[in-house]
Amino acid sequence: MLDVEWKRHEPEYMKVCVYENGSDRPDKQDDHYRGRTEMNTDLLTTGDLGLTLRQPTVKDAGRYACEVNSKEAWRYKRVWLTVKGEL
C-alpha cells in the first residue's frame, strides 16, 4: 500500500492533501485546502504523485513537501510554489 502526504512547511505548517490506504482523505487536510486539491487516483500504475491546486492565491505561496510511504521505502521531496498574482 502507498501513502502520500502533501504538506506546506512555510510560511506555516498545513496538511495540503492526504492519500492513504488507497483513497483520498479530505478529513485530514487543512480547511484552507479542502475542495481545492486533486491527485491522480491511480498512483501505483502511473507513478504520478503530482498535486493539482485549484484557484491558487498569494496565500498559497511557500515551501511544500511530498512525503511517500510504502512497505519498501520512504521518500521525501520539497518544492517551492510562487504565486505572482490573482485573477
Image (tube, grey):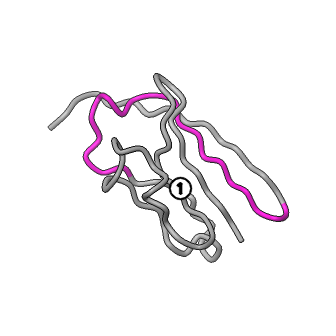
Residue occupying the point 45% across, 49% down: 29
Looking at the image, residue 45 sits to the left or right of residue 29; the answer is: right
Give the position of the N terminus as an image quadrant. Answer: bottom right
The relative height of residue 74 versus residue 40 in the rendered view (above or below) is: above
Disc 1 residue crowd, few under 14, some 14–19, many 20+, Cα 10 Å: many
Frontmost residue, 13 versus 72: 13
Give the position of the C terminus as an image quadrant. Answer: top left
Q: Is residue 64 magenta?
A: yes
Residue named by callout 1: 18
Q: Give the extent of the magenta segment.
A: 53-72
- Which residue occupies the extreme left position in the image? 87
Name the amino acid type tagged 1: Val
Whole-percent x, y for residue 36 in the image: 32, 53
Frontmost residue, 53 versus 20: 20
- Which residue occupies the extreme front position in the image? 27
Residue occupying the point 49% across, 53% down: 28
The relative height of residue 47 versus residue 16 in the rendered view (above or below) is: below
Residue occupying the point 49% across, 62% down: 25
Total number of numbered discs in the rendering: 1
Whole-percent x, y for residue 8 in the image: 50, 35
